[in-house]
Amino acid sequence: MGKKIPEINSGSMADISFLLLTFFLLTSSIDTDLGITRKLPPPPPPERKIDRIKERNVFVVLVNSNNQLMVQGKGMDISQLKDETKKFLENPYDDPNLPEKQDVNIDLLGNYKVSKGVISLQNDRGTTYEMYIKVQNELTAAVNELRNELSKKKFGVKFEDLKDEAQTKAIQKAIPVSISEAEPKNVGGQK
Amino acid sequence: MARFKKAGSRSVPAINTGSMSDIIFMFLFFFMVITTMRESTLYVKIKPPAATEVQKLEKKSLVSFIYVGFPQNAAVYGKEPRIQLNDQISEVSDIKEFIEKEKAARDEIDRQLLTTSLKVDKEAKMGIVTDIKQELRQVSAFKINYSTAKGIKKNAN
């Protein structure tokens, strides 16, 4: 009873936790992984039948080994690609040169005219990855903008702010990401 | 005069440092929560390209990474972009085994949700990326993510 328990010296505690802190700072990184998500098509079956797609439904995007862009047979700057893609996918005035539309019954949206347009993207083996991502980014931007517009019209909020899973699904169905990547060419001759 | 002398002899009370460790611990927990552990040491140099339409990679446990970039050790691995899987420089043909191992490590239900994140240097050519994509199609790892840095939007709307 009489003996007094000596106080534990906690002065070095701060030093220990500082060490731990520096350890974690060094071994971890803050970067969150961001990126463009895509879905690859399954490998073609051996006896593949070639689907014929009408010419008006295809939006041809070509990138060569010098990172030059050709869209629908014309050279184009990357800054115009988004608007051209939007025009193609939207086809607001039912232009006979732009893709057809198909009436599809979608939950929450009712009958919606879904565009039959397909973007065909082909690049060379010598195209740099940076250019490829730029093109993919512009194409994604076009789709995202169209989705945002539709979502605002129907539900009053932007597509990415939609809380309801069913609403997200409906918009995704109305404006699908239809990018088809052809097997790359090797014109540039590099590996 | 005596008054001044008295003031000088008074000692400054010691600052209580007992709560210092608590503060540091709070720091520590903060950093532990907001950061992620580095997955593996990189043997290739990767500068990701920038993009604006990015999505966050969800469910870190369901992501496998493929790195493509210029080797750090150019004397051994050459100057051309190479593929790194886990902790070693690999060939395109090794991807099949890598993905199958990754799949085997997950639950049956999670296998379809497995995403492959491609971390590719922006200077790399598409040839090597295409080869990887073809290989991934063969092993039915269809969900992919092109890892990018966040770019700045030119016209915000």
Image: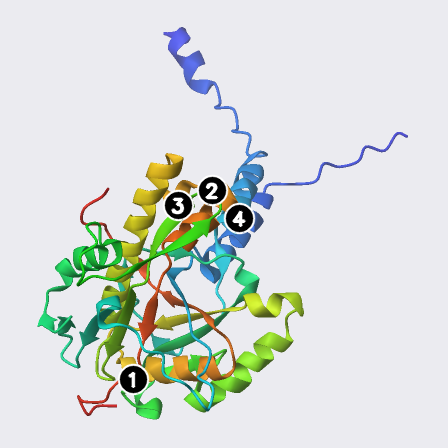
Residue A36, relative to residue A93: is it above or below?
below
Question: Which residue was labeled with disc 3?
Answer: A160
Any mark on residue A30, and which? Answer: none
Comparing marks 2 and 1, which lies closer to the viewer? 2
Residue B15, relative to residue B67: is it above or below?
above
Whole-percent x, y for residue A48 in the image:
42, 87
- Local crowd size for mark 4, using a 10 Å CA cut-off: few (<14), some (14–19), many (≥20): few
Q: How many marks?
A: 4
Whole-percent x, y for residue B24 in the image:
52, 42
Q: Earlier in the sequence, mark 3 or mark 2?
A: 2
What's the chain of the residue with tag 1? B
Question: Which residue was labeled with disc 2?
Answer: A108
Decide which of B2, B146 is in the foreground and name it: B146
Q: Residue furthest right?
A: A1
Question: Which residue was labeled with disc 1?
Answer: B127
Q: CA distance from mark 1 to mark 3?
A: 33 Å
- Local crowd size for mark 3, using a 10 Å CA cut-off: few (<14), some (14–19), many (≥20): few
- Local crowd size for mark 2, using a 10 Å CA cut-off: few (<14), some (14–19), many (≥20): few
Q: CA distance from mark 3 to mark 4?
A: 25 Å
Whole-percent x, y for residue B2 in the image:
41, 8
Is the Cβ of the residue at disc 2 closer than 8 Å to that at disc 4? no
What's the chain of the residue with tag 4? B
